[in-house]
């Protein structure tokens, strides 16, 4: 029976791997890649009133719809266009090669005209009230477009003349193009996604009042036509406030490097898990493969656009997926060391680890949601992938991985083979008393180290400050690449002649140079700069521009993101545990965030918008680590003393015990999460190297602060409450969640 059960279990695994193997090539071929991986053009517009008028949300929406229609003309297969804030529109065109043509088409004012069938101009949008098109009905109750006429005299003269023509039709155009007149477009006229010809109407008489455009329209077609007509009569203009171009070769090179780094990172994690946890590590590795497949599959289903930060978020999610396994395996090991048989230890370990896994992932999810709300462009993509990663982690590691483990455990094959199953050789806790290290008595040393690091950081920030990228100080970034080679001195002289103020210049290699200039280049200057370096050095140019408007918005959103993430974590931990836990957690998170900032100041590394994502990710990851420890402290106190501590020494021992029990787990989790980050630093794309350096610093700081700061502070606060009556909570604490087959 054991052999039969093992065979059936392995057969299920083979089927799962077969399905993933068959579907993966198709899935990855159909993924949408962002312009940082595919090359292309990105621009952020501010919608402004022509004469300083306030811009309404309807105006922004109609402008957005006009731009959607224009993008069709560019032939971009997967454009991304989004409304940001109250009056901004971001356009991302991955794969486009002519940024100049894209700029020209996107930024021109929407132009609505009325023409005859020979393309002669009859009237412009001035004849209508601004936003004067409305959804209406014809005399038979069918959907129709109602036009509010402003210049009724002109409208009457024109319609009267047209009614007397042999071909008495008026053609309504949006952005009329002389190269494709009505003769060419007649068959497509009214097909809103395929032609600039919006509608053609037969005129039987002159009209001196508001009119109805009627036909065999659906309600949706009428609504689209109304929006397009209104966009052509809007008193708005588009001001370019930020832009970025990435050549296709840069994009493909970044994708190639990142994929290779990811494969190496995942392979090393799988190897580590198998070495440490033996057969359970094999199942955990299978869980990571399922996690990776499902994460990409969901991202594809929601139409997500994969970017470099998105891949980094997915690899960070692998670290959290590993953590869920490590928590579970550690709890099973603890139960075995208590003397329980294998089946009982496995069941108890699953039960005890579930709440910890859910708590730790929910706090990280909170940070990801805040990032999504306040992030822009690549930050939003990072947050989306992080949210998907967290949800998939909880599903795969809590349900699928445990289900697969259960299949093998139920066979009874591992009942006397704990080492083969989980890599446990010594079940005697007393023989592991090398872990008798007293963390609490060393708290002064830990605090002194942290204070020293904070002081050094403050000195560096006061002396050197931060090397702010264009996201936070405005300006333009230029990356030049030429196979003929580039000379730093020559480039500096060129920029000076062009009237630009050079902030920094960094040489990647003989063919590639990164520049930062103080000026926010206009679209004309961007084109001139690209042309200059192409003619002089046959160099490809990637140029990013950030104006003061965007800079202020990014700074505000960065501050709000950090503030709200901190408040959210304090509220969650206070409700889930006690306020004293929240104090320890938030101080340790601020400690981690500050250390990242301090190291960036000391090493003079550039701070950009993706740096904020790194800090928030570390906050999410660090709180994950801290909650695992807090869960163990809470559980130990509840189990041993029924929540009643009478002496300071008892409390000290419980904290030390909890730290010893979770110490190995913290080291393994940090190590497995560091692996893909280190691979991305040494093998990945240059564009996100600073993000990964921030993650590296933060992961080390987060592991340290959870063990040496958060728990120590909690102890210092709690020891003052010993002997005092407990305050009743203002809410009912939820009972432990029990899921059949998972933890019960």
Image (cartoon, grey):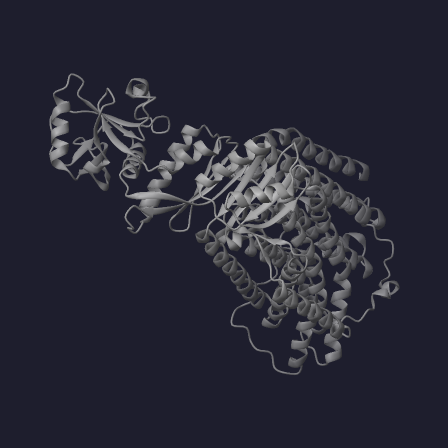
Q: Quadrant of the N terminus?
A: top right
Instruction: Name the quadrant containing residue 227.
Output: top left
Frontmost residue, 137 versus 450: 450
In the rendering, at what x and y percent does residue 268 appear? 76, 43
Residue at 19% from the left image edge and 36% from the top image edge? 127
The answer to whether 233 is drawn above or below residue 357 in the figure is above
Residue at 29% from the left image edge and 20% from the top image edge? 186
| Count of marks, rendered view | 0
Using the rendered image of the protein, determine whether residue 496 is visible from the camera's viewpoint: yes
Q: Quadrant of the C terminus?
A: bottom right
The answer to whether 706 is drawn above or below residue 531 in the figure is below
Residue at 83% from the left image edge and 68% from the top image edge? 436
Frontmost residue, 403 versus 287: 287
Frontmost residue, 551 versus 646: 551
Frontmost residue, 582 versus 444: 444
In the rendering, at what x and y percent does residue 147 appear? 20, 36
Using the rendered image of the protein, determine whether residue 408 is visible from the camera's viewpoint: no
The residue furthest bottom is 723
Instruction: Name the quadrant containing residue 477.
Output: top right
Q: Is residue 253 left or right of residue 669?
A: left
The answer to whether 248 is drawn above or below residue 596 in the figure is above
Q: Is residue 631 left or right of residue 368?
A: right
In the rendering, at what x and y percent does residue 457 appear? 66, 65
Q: Is residue 651 left or right of residue 81?
A: right
């Amino acid at each position: 029976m054991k052999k039969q059960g093992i065979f059936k279990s392995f057969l299920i695994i083979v089927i799962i791997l077969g399905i993933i193997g068959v579907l993966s090539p198709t899935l990855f071929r159909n993924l949408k890649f962002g312009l940082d991986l595919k090359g292309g053009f990105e621009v952020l517009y501010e919608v402004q009133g022509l004469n300083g008028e306030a811009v309404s949300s309807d105006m922004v929406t109609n402008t957005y719809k006009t731009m959607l229609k224009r993008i069709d003309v560019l032939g971009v297969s997967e454009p991304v266009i989004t409304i940001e804030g109250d009056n901004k529109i971001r356009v991302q065109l991955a794969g486009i090669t002519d940024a100049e043509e894209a700029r020209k088409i996107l930024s021109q004012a929407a132009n609505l005209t009325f023409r005859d069938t020979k393309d002669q101009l009859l009237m412009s949008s001035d004849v209508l009230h601004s936003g004067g098109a409305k959804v209406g009905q014809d005399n038979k109750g069918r959907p129709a477009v109602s036009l509010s006429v402003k210049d009724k005299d002109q409208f009457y003269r024109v319609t009267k003349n047209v009614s007397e023509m042999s071909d008495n039709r008026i053609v309504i155009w949006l952005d009329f193009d002389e190269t494709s007149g009505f003769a060419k477009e007649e068959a497509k006229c009214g097909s809103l996604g395929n032609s600039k010809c919006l509608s053609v109407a037969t005129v039987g008489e002159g009209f001196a009042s508001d009119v109805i455009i009627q036909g065999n329209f659906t309600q949706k077609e009428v609504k689209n036509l109304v929006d397009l007509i209104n966009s052509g009569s809007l008193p708005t203009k588009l001001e370019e406030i930020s832009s970025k171009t990435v050549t296709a070769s840069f994009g493909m090179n970044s994708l190639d490097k990142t994929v290779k780094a990811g494969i190496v990172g995942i392979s090393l994690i799988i190897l580590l898990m198998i070495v440490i946890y033996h057969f359970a590590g094999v199942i955990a590795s299978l869980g990571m493969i399922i996690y990776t497949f499902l994460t990409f599959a969901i991202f594809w289903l929601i139409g997500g656009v994969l970017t470099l930060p998105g891949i980094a978020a997915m690899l960070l999610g692998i670290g959290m997926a590993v953590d869920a396994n490590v928590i579970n395996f550690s709890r099973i090991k603890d139960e075995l060391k208590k003397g329980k048989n294998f089946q009982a230890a496995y069941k108890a370990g699953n039960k005890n680890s579930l709440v910890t896994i859910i708590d730790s992932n929910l706090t990280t999810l909170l940070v990801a949601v805040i990032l999504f709300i306040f992030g822009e462009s690549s930050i939003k993509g990072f947050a989306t992938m992080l949210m998907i990663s967290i949800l998939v982690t909880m599903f795969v590691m809590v349900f699928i991985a445990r289900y697969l483990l259960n299949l093998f455990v139920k066979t009874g094959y591992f009942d006397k083979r704990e080492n083969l199953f989980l890599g446990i050789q010594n079940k005697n806790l007393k023989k592991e008393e090398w872990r008798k290290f007293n963390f609490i008595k060393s708290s002064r040393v830990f605090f002194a180290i942290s204070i020293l690091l904070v002081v050094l950081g403050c000195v560096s920030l006061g002396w050197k400050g931060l090397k702010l990228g264009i996201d936070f100080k405005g300006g333009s970034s230029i990356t030049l690449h030429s196979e003929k080679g580039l000379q730093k001195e020559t480039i500096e002289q060129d920029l000076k002649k062009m009237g630009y103020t050079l902030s920094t210049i960094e040489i990647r290699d003989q063919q590639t140079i990164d520049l930062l200039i103080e000026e926010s280049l206009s679209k004309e200057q961007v084109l001139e700069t690209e042309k200059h370096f192409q003619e002089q050095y046959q160099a490809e140019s990637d140029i990013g521009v950030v104006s003061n408007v965007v800079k202020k918005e990014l700074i505000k959103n960065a501050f709000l993101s950090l503030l709200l993430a901190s408040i959210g974590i304090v509220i969650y931990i206070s409700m889930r545990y006690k306020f004293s836990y929240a104090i320890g957690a938030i101080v340790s998170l601020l400690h981690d965030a500050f250390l990242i900032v301090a190291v960036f100041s000391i090493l003079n590394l550039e701070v950009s918008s993706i740096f904020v994502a790194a800090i928030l990710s570390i906050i999410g990851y660090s709180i994950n680590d801290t909650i695992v420890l807090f869960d163990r402290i809470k559980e130990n106190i509840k189990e041993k003393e029924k929540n009643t501590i009478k002496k300071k020494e008892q409390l000290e021992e419980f904290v030390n015990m909890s730290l010893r029990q979770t110490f190995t787990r913290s080291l393994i989790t940090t190590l497995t999460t560091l692996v893909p980050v280190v691979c991305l630093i040494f093998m990945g794309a240059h564009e996100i190297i600073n993000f990964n350096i921030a993650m590296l610093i933060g992961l080390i700081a987060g592991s340290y602060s959870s063990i040496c700061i958060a728990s120590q502070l909690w102890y210092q606060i709690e020891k003052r409450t010993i002997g005092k009556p407990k305050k009743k909570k203002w809410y009912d604490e939820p009972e432990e969640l029990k899921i059949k087959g998972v933890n019960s």
